[in-house]
Amino acid sequence: MSATQHHHHQDPAAPNAVRALWRLRVFIGRSAPAFVLSAVFASAGQLIGLSIPQVLESMVDGPLADGEAAAVVPFALLIFGLGVLEALFYALRRWVVVGPGTRVESRMRNALYAKLQDLPVSFHDKWPSGQLLSRAVSDLGLVRRWLSFGLVFTFVNLLTIVVGIGILVSMNWMLGLVFLVCAMPLWIIGYRFEGRYSEMSRLSQDQAGDLATAVEESVHGIRVLKAFGRGKHALSSFRKQAESLRSTEIEKARLDANIWAWLLLVPALSISLCLGLGIWLTANGELSVGTLVAFFATATMLAWPIESIGFLLAFALDARTATDRFFEVIDSENTVVDPETPRVLGDPVGALSFTDVRFRYQDSPERFGDLLQGVDLDIRPGETMALVGLTGCGKTTMTALTTRLYDVTGGSITLDGVDVRAFSREELRRHIAMAFEDATLFSDSVRANVLLGRPGLEGDAAEQVLHEALRIAQAGFAYDLPDGVETKVGEEGMSLSGGQRQRLALARAVAAKPAVLVLDDPLSALDVATEARVEAELRAVLASTTALIVAHRPSTVMMADRVALLEDGRVTAVGTHSELLRESEHYRFVISSLEDDAANQPGFGEVDPDRSEASDHHPRTSETQISEGAAS
């Protein structure tokens, strides 16, 4: 899903830049005095700079007019001292604001990451990862730079313009008025510039997020692209997105160039008019030479603050867009929340029950019914229940409901008689562990991945749990990796084969020591020999653990004490494998489908212990990983 195709376009009714940026005060917090002090130092530097023309006026109308060269020296030293003091204040401004600016960025980034961790899976289903990445990195960096520089100098330069024009008017009201009138069009031009530039800024940042998504997807899917020879197609698609972003950036640059043309032309025109008028006034004796020099020195000093209006306005609009994008995530509603007074499960028994459970995805069209349409299922403590059904009947969704990755839209799921929504999510997921068919590992060591669900475990106890989990999952290959269990598995564990990743994911679920173990076809990538050994070890674990297993192989069904048949959004039959074979025609059809699928698996019916053992003890790399991954 592209952000630029959906709800991310700028709404005309959206809050203006000031109101949007005002929301940042929550994250500025205790850093506010530093930004104020930075503005004070910068203002002091600017005001000291504005005082230099007054010294020039006194010097020109005094010693220079009288021809006293020696008397010029004190004025020159005073100007030099003022210049040094101005530079010192600017250095203090930067020194004061750097630390607080980075702390604000850090707080915002931490808040964004915490929100992303807290939001339900349904949110992540809809949002491209590149959009989230661009918000966490480039957008927040832009906000930090605006707070540290743009915000401070917007205030300072506006103050400088007001004070400077006041000084010009005090020198000569006629010259000052001409200068002021000539500057007025800049405000009209800036107002018109804001609307169009704001729209282009938002589009640019959204397109940059889409481009980041494209890069991430192509990197993660590089094996698929290479296997199908679609690298040029991916490049072509990327080039189109890059060209769209380039066109938007060029449009932004055109708008920037237009306002800069006005910002350079108008002050130059006003100075030219004032120069002609000033010379005429001086020639008529209505203005001294020193005052004329001081006037144009002051006007020259106002050139940068006036010219910076366009840059600072564009900067503020970019920051406003980045802030809006940030708060889009922060303001996202979390529908899966902890109760106000969560229950605590002391010594769980492991009884898991589904009562009239209904579920539909939020973006499911109204014309379609619920995916689950009243599931009733009781799993007794210590029992292993296999869940079977045709593809797309909702088996994986049903398992995801147990740990509240999604919340039921009707009915209830209970653990030991308590609705799972009565527990905090942390408490619930401490007692129910999951292993998914699509095994995801993190860019960390094997040890850290396997012990992910036991964060407080250390020392000998951690070693014992790690060793036992790896043994049960038949993941002994981990000890033969280059650094053993300390080996970094790489991004998403892609340095390992599919079967190796799946066994480590299974070991992670086993190591969590849950009361209920939910397995979504966790053995699909294993060869028959390895699967048999894993199942043998799992039987010992499952003897004392309640388990719900989504089965896609007949061998997995045979591990279960009972089997539940999911059909048309309901559990239509529950019993032992032999009972359902005898009593349910649909069950026989499903099992025959599973057998056909298993027969088509590579290596089906071939038990080669030597090959299987060898594959466990050699890390996968480059071409060998691809070829062996197909066999696993």
Image (cartoon, rainbow, N blue to C red):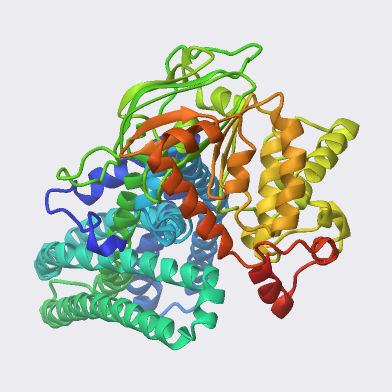
Q: Quadrant of residue 250?
A: bottom left
Q: Return the x and y of residue 561 as percentages of the image width and height.
A: 61, 29
Q: Quadrant of residue 306?
A: bottom left
Residue 564 versus residue 352: which sits nearer the camera?
564
Q: How many marks?
A: 0
- At x 68%, y 76%, the residue is 627
Q: Return the x and y of residue 427 as percentages of the image width and height.
A: 57, 22
- At x 43%, y 33%, the residue is 583
Q: Point out the image quarter for the C terminus.
A: bottom right
Is residue 404 among what the camera can see?
no
Q: Quadrant of residue 410?
A: top left
Residue 148 versus residue 199: which sits nearer the camera?
199
- Give the vertical position of 55 relative to 542 (above or below): below
Judged from this view, the residue extending furthest toward the front is 582
Residue 558 versus residue 459: which sits nearer the camera?
558
- At x 12%, y 48%, the residue is 13
Q: Return the x and y of residue 215 as percentages of the image width and height.
A: 47, 72
Q: Point out the image quarter for the N terminus.
A: bottom left
Residue 174 versus residue 361: which sits nearer the camera?
361
- Give the vertical position of 164 relative to 252 (above or below): above
- At x 50%, y 65%, the residue is 83
Q: Return the x and y of residue 174 as percentages of the image width and height.
A: 9, 66
- Give the vertical position of 532 relative to 269 (above or below): above
Left or right: where 574 falls relative to 614:
left
- Give the vertical position of 103 relative to 3 (above or below): above
Is residue 148 among what the camera can see?
yes
Left or right: where 122 falls relative to 216:
left
Judged from this view, the residue extending furthest toward the right is 460
